[in-house]
Amino acid sequence: MPGSPDSAVTRRAFVVGAAAAAGSAALAGPLAGAASAAGFGWSDDGSHYVVDTGADLVFKVGKTNGDLTSLVYKGTEYQGYGGKNSHIESGLGSSTVGIRQSGATILVSVAHGTLRHYYAARSGENNVYLWTHKADSSVSATRYILRVKAGMFLNDQPDSYTYAPTTVEAADVFRKADGQTRSKHYARLRAIDYDYTGWSTGGVGLWIVRSNHEKASGGPFYRSLLRHQSADGGGLYEILYYGENQTEAERYGLQGPYVIAFTDGGAPSSALYHGMLTTPWADSLGLSGYVPDSGRGRVAGVGIAGRDTAYPYTVGLANAAAQYWSAARASDGWFSIPRVLPGTYTLTVYKGELAVHSTRVTVAAGATTALNTITIPASGDPSAARAIWRIGDWNGTPSGFKNADLMTYAHPSDVRAAPWTGNVVIGSGTETSAFPCYLWKDVNSGLLVHFRLTAAQAAAAHLLRIGVTTAFANGRPQVTVNDIWTSPIPSPPAQPTTRSLTVGSYRGNNHTFTYSVPASAWRTDTGRYNVLRIDVVSGSGTTGYLSAGTAIDAIDLLV
């Protein structure tokens, strides 16, 4: 779902790198790192291992806890705020920390219980490569946070709350004096949309280049924290597992590399992007859970038939151990997913964000699993069903509905949001844009849809479908037609139990509610409007925008 018209430029220049945008400025130092740069090496100051990359970057790692305690680029310290260091989660505490040099690579290893964490430096590069191996739930490790000193990089973007002192919700959503809302949750982008996150002053850029999220959870369309900026400093994140609005169980194993990268102000080199980066130099480092490219396979498909060319298609692979995805080529649906761990996966084809086909594939090390043309069956895409009328389209997102373009980077109470109330008339030409993307029990429940039927249509029973993309507090739609017929209260589908609609995410489990409306519910006078009322029902939730709610994908009345 796109942001506001002016947000794309801001996002690319200052917030995160779009997956399609190539890095425009090369990093200092050769990424290949064949020869040792002058000054490359490490020392021990008693409390820290001090690593000099031989370029413009020197960093320190605490010998007792594995914290990144210093990050000096061109003589300026960037690390830390509020007396806190950069580290896994909120810091591991007492850990076993070691260091060794192997040719053009220096590796710092951190062991804490069953968790292993690594920092690597390559000679002549202004990068720090990180891996995190979480073996089980005995150690908390859901993120790596790079803490950055206050005043180094300034911004007033959705994920900033430097100038937003009024709390709107919990302790992490804020309102500025002009009514715009800010939160670290409002990152806008899905995992598939970005390669890096960070800031630039124009002369210095500091970035985290994300890993391939092989061991993360949530799939290609998942949103999680990317960065934040507040009065005390800033934070850049690599999320290992984020419980907010989560649809999958946590995966264990090695995640990485993800890269802390300094530049002269431009984007990080595209050679560091997860789809481009290769690390043969790490094959012999002994990283826990590390699988070299030679131990991986590939899945490739010659095309996808039955696509709606108005939408992008994505192919995903997932099992309990790993996840991967790739965009399908717009012209024919060709796709390729490289560097896949051996195993059997569910392959899912998504139209937009809606799953329209799935099958099973098996991947072997060193081999390509080649697939013939995949044909999406008519039953897989709800849009194929003939409808008397339809609001929106079936694509797994609220795209096109009222306020949908704002909700990934603002709170529903934001001054920029159009009123959440208001009824809809079929045939007006504004059915979708006038229909709110979200419905809440305490905000706009009871929304009315007006429509006419022909005599033949009014003489028959019809199926009404309401597709949703997620729900909060078990909010689900109950419908009433002409105050004559009311549907039973549907059972709530499985959905995430955390906040979603108010923290920038409409993504949960796509679900379709189907209602069998009898012919006796329709008006027989074809000159009069039929009236459909949609109420949100639930015994959970609180008030306002935290009352039970749901996000809309599409609504239609079938022939």
Image (tube, grey):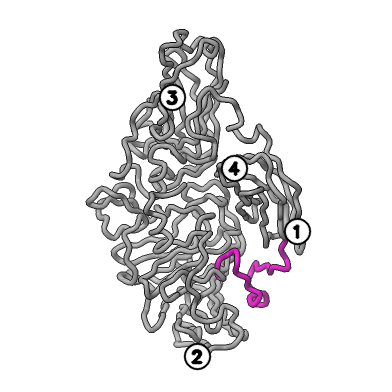
Q: Which one is earlier in the sequence, the residue at label 2 or at label 4?
A: 2
The secondary element bearing badge 2 is classed as loop
* 439 relative to 135 in the view: left or right: left
Residue denoted by label 2: 39
Q: Position of residue 54 (x, y in %)?
A: 50, 86
Q: Which one is earlier in the sequence, the residue at label 2 or at label 3?
A: 2
Q: Which one is earlier in the sequence, the residue at label 1 or at label 2?
A: 2
Say what amino acid the circle numbered 1 marks: Thr
Q: CA distance from mark 4 to mark 1?
A: 27 Å
The secondary element bearing badge 3 is classed as loop
Q: Main secondary structure of the magenta part?
A: loop
Residues 153 and 241: in front is: 153
Mark 1 crowdedness (10 Å alpha carbons): few <14, some 14-19, many ≥20: some
Query: In the displayed structure, would residue 81 be above or below residue 21?
Result: below
Is residue 142 visible in the rendered image? The answer is: no
Residue denoted by label 1: 368
Q: Position of residue 255 (x, y in %)?
A: 58, 64
Say what amino acid the circle numbered 4 marks: Thr
Q: Position of residue 370 (x, y in %)?
A: 76, 53
Is residue 502 visible in the rendered image? The answer is: yes
* 343 relative to 133 in the view: left or right: right
The secondary element bearing badge 1 is classed as strand
Question: Within the image, what quadrant is residue 284 found in?
Answer: bottom right
Residue denoted by label 3: 427
Question: Within the image, what quadrant is residue 401 found in?
Answer: top left
Camera-near label (2 vs 3) is 3
Q: CA distance from mark 4 to mark 3?
A: 25 Å
Residues 536 and 405: in front is: 405
Camera-near label (1 vs 2) is 1
Q: CA distance from mark 2 to mark 4?
A: 55 Å
Q: Which one is earlier in the sequence, the residue at label 1 or at label 3?
A: 1
